[in-house]
Image (cartoon, coloured by chain):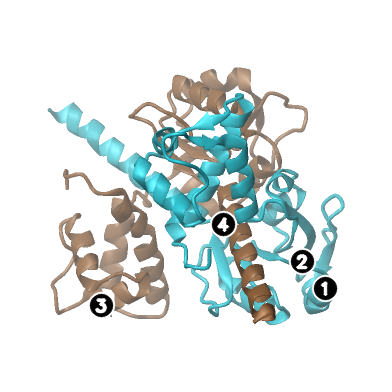
Chain colours: A cyan, B brown
C-alpha cells in the first residue's frame, strides 16, 4: 500500500467507482475485469494491474464482488469522510459552487466563500467573508480544500495566501498553471482549455465540410 | 494539414497559446522550442513534432516569432471566430455559465438557457427557454455548442435531444460518460472526478502523517 501509485491510476479510480455504482443500482453482484475494462476502454490486464496497486480485491476468474469493490474504493478514495471546502472568489462560478448541493454525494461541503468585497452577501447557509479573515478562519476551522474561482491575474496570490494559511489542497478554476510547493496538491478544472479543444474541433469539421463541397 | 492530429497534441495547443500570450504581454518577440518545451514540461523535439502537424511555423535554431505563432495557433484553433452556445439545465452551474462574461475571450457566447421549468427567468441578456422550444431554436439560430449542466440521470436524454436537433458539439458538465455518434464531439468537465482525485490525495496525506507519528 505504501508504494507510489501513478496519477493515471488515481484518475481512473473515480471512473471505476462510477461504473460500479451503476452496476450496483442495476442489481449486479459480480463483475469481471474484462467487463470493467470494456467500460473504461482499457485492457483487462490494465484493470488487474490497477487493482494490484491496492492489494488485489478479488480472484481472477471469479470476478469481483461489486459491493465489496465499491466499499474498498470508497475507503481508498476517502469518500467515507466529509471534507470541508472554502471558495475564494465570489463571482458567478464561485457563487454557483457555494450553492451547489451535489458535492455532498462526493463527501465535500462548501463552508465559506471569501472575496475582497463582501457586499454581495453569502449563498444560502454559506457566509461571504473578507479575504482579511482568511488566515484566522483557516486557523480556527478544518479546511481541507481551497477552491480558487478568481480571475487568472490574482489566482497565484490567492493560492499563496491559502498555502500560507495552511491549506494544502487546491481546486483551481482559474485559467492558469499554479506553481506550488511539493506538499500542496492542485486539481485543475480547465474550462478555457476545454473550450479551445471544442473550438479546434468545430474548425476541423467546417474544413471537412468545405472539402466535401469542393470535391 | 489533412492528416489526423492526435488528441494529445490538440489538448496541448491551448497551453502553447496561453504561454505565448504571456510572453507577448511581457514583450518577448522570439521563443525557442526548448523554452516552450520547458514551459509545457515536454521535450523540445516534441514541440517541433507538434508544430509539424500544422506545417512547421519557423526555422529550427532561429526560434519562433511569438506574435506570428500566436496568430497561427488562433487560426488553427478557430479563436478568430465567435461560437454560439446554448446551456441546458438552469441550475446553479448552468446559470453561472450563462452569466459568465469570460467566455468571450475564448470566442464563445451563451445565447440561451433551456430547462423544463422556465419560471426562474433568464440571466442578464440570456433568455430562459422551455425544452419544448429547443428543436425550433436550433433550426432558426446558429448553435455551435450545447452545454449540458443537468443531473446525470437526464444528461443522456438531453444529449440525444441536442444531437437530434442538429447540435454536433457538446460541453458536458454532468458526471456521466455520454455515448454519442461519431460525428459528435464531447468535451467533459468532470468536477466529481476531480473531487475524487483531491479526496484520494487528502487521504494519502493523512496516512503519511499517521505513519510519521508511529515511526
Discs 4 and 2 carry the same chain letter: no
Rendered position, A22 above or below B205: above
Q: Which residue is mark 2?
A: A114
Q: Residue A29 is drawn in which quadrant?
A: top right
Q: Which residue is depicted at the point 37% across and 26% down?
A: B181
Please count the marks in the image.
4
Circle 3 sits in a helix, a strand or a loop, which is it?
helix
Mark 3 or 4: the one toward you: 4
Find the distance from the CA under tag 1 to the CA under tag 2: 10 Å
Which of these two is toward me, A24 or B195? A24
Q: Which residue is mark 4?
A: B197
Asked whether the beta carbons under mark 1 and mark 2 sit within 8 Å of each other, the answer is yes
Output the chain of dot 2: A
**Neighbour tally class for label 4: few under 14, some 14-19, many 20 plus, Cα within 10 Å:** many
Mark 4 or 1: the one toward you: 4
Find the distance from the CA under tag 3 to the CA under tag 2: 40 Å
Q: Which residue is mark 1?
A: A137
Which of these two is toward me, A186 or A127? A186
**Neighbour tally class for label 3: few under 14, some 14-19, many 20 plus, Cα within 10 Å:** some
Which of these two is toward me, B206 or B197? B206
Discs 4 and 1 carry the same chain letter: no
Asked whether the beta carbons under mark 1 and mark 3 sit within 8 Å of each other, the answer is no
Output the chain of dot 3: B
Circle 4 sits in a helix, a strand or a loop, which is it?
helix
Discs 1 and 3 carry the same chain letter: no
Amino acid at each position: 500500500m505504501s508504494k507510489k501509485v501513478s496519477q493515471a491510476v488515481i484518475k481512473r479510480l473515480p471512473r471505476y467507482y462510477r461504473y460500479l455504482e451503476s452496476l450496483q443500482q442495476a442489481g449486479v453482484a459480480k463483475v469481471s475485469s474484462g467487463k470493467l475494462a470494456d467500460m473504461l476502454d482499457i485492457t483487462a490486464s490494465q484493470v488487474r494491474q490497477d487493482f494490484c496497486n491496492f492489494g488485489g480485491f478479488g480472484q481472477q476468474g471469479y470476478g469481483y464482488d461489486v459491493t465489496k469493490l465499491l466499499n474498498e474504493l470508497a475507503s481508498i478514495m476517502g469518500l467515507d469522510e466529509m471534507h470541508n471546502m472554502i471558495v475564494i472568489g465570489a463571482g458567478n462560478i464561485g457563487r454557483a459552487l457555494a450553492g451547489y448541493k451535489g458535492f455532498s454525494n462526493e463527501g465535500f461541503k462548501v463552508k465559506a466563500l471569501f472575496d475582497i468585497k463582501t457586499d454581495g452577501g453569502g449563498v444560502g447557509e454559506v457566509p461571504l467573508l473578507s479575504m482579511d479573515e482568511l488566515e484566522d478562519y483557516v486557523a480556527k476551522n478544518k479546511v481541507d480544500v481551497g477552491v480558487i474561482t478568481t480571475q487568472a491575474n490574482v489566482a497565484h496570490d490567492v493560492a499563496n495566501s491559502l498555502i500560507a494559511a495552511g491549506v494544502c489542497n487546491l481546486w483551481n478554476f482559474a485559467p492558469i498553471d499554479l506553481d506550488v510547493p511539493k506538499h500542496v496538491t492542485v486539481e485543475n478544472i480547465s474550462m478555457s482549455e476545454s473550450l479551445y479543444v471544442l473550438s479546434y474541433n468545430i474548425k476541423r469539421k467546417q474544413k471537412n465540410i468545405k472539402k466535401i463541397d469542393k470535391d
